[in-house]
Amino acid sequence: MLPNARIEFLGGCRDMAPVLVGTVPFGFVAGVAAIGAGMSPLEGIALSFVAFSGIAQLVVAQLVAAKSPAIVTLAAVFVVSLRFLMYSAALSPHLAHLPRRWRVPLSYLMTDQGFAMGARHYALPGDRSLRHYRMLGSGLTLFCTWQAAVIAGALLGAQVPAAWSLDFVVTLSFLAILVPAVRTRADIAAAVVAGAASLAAAGLPYKLSLVVASLAGIAAGVAVEGRHRR
């Protein structure tokens, strides 16, 4: 690895470090949820490596516990994962020139946290030619930490008292991502509208409220940004 590439890679590792405070308990909760749904520790760990998405893993755990048909479970995971299409569209102008050997692992490592970091990195001025190394560093840091936390949760989940209410950590971890990313009026509009839409659509099945909130937030942000430019 070239010296400058190494600097970018290690910078990505450092950038992701503060997020890990919420990632560890979030991953632990995902591992516990898999065991609570009736999966074996091996199944819960395998799900984490295949999906690598906390929300998707929690949705699968909920539907498996409810004994939902496999097709319903897959459809629900597809719906809650649609946000990654928006993430990919937003970052593709910066990554489309990379060879497949880069784009495939970066797409696998893409998470909500990874997208937030990537968008922030590419918004900074300066040379962007090696910033994919920064994304790789932040993605691998999160991946290794997440899998370790899920494994711990899957192996120790049965011993965690329900009174601990660890599921609240999920909300805290996403707040830690959101707050630093909200800088402009368009960001604020997107966050407020998405939050309101999520609450209004909370009763929709299969976590469709996430998709509705994402689309509403994007529309609000684009509208405010367009008005500001005019």
Image (cartoon, rainbow, N blue to C red):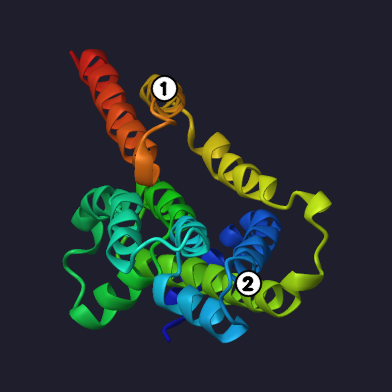
Of 42 and 169, which appears nearest the observer?
A: 42
In the rendered image, the quadrant that contains the N terminus is bottom left
User: Quadrant location of residue 51?
Assistant: bottom left
Of 226 and 156, which appears nearest the observer?
A: 156
Disc 1 marks a residue whose amino acid type is Ala
Disc number placed over residue 200 in the picture, else none:
1
Of 45 and 71, which appears nearest the observer?
A: 71
Say left or right for 107 vs 182: left
When the figure is inspected, residue 198 is found, relative to residue 196, above or below; the finding is below
Residue in view at x 34 percent, y 40 percent: 208
Instruction: Say which of marks 1 and 2 sits in front.
Output: 2
* Element marked by disc 1: helix
When the figure is inspected, residue 154 is found, relative to residue 126, above or below; the finding is below
Disc number placed over residue 157 in the picture, else none:
none
Q: Position of residue 58 (x, y in %)?
A: 52, 58
Say left or right for 184 vs 71: right
Residue in view at x 76 percent, y 76 percent: 156
* Element marked by disc 2: helix
Residue labelled with disc 2:
35
When the figure is inspected, residue 230 is found, relative to residue 98, above or below; the finding is above
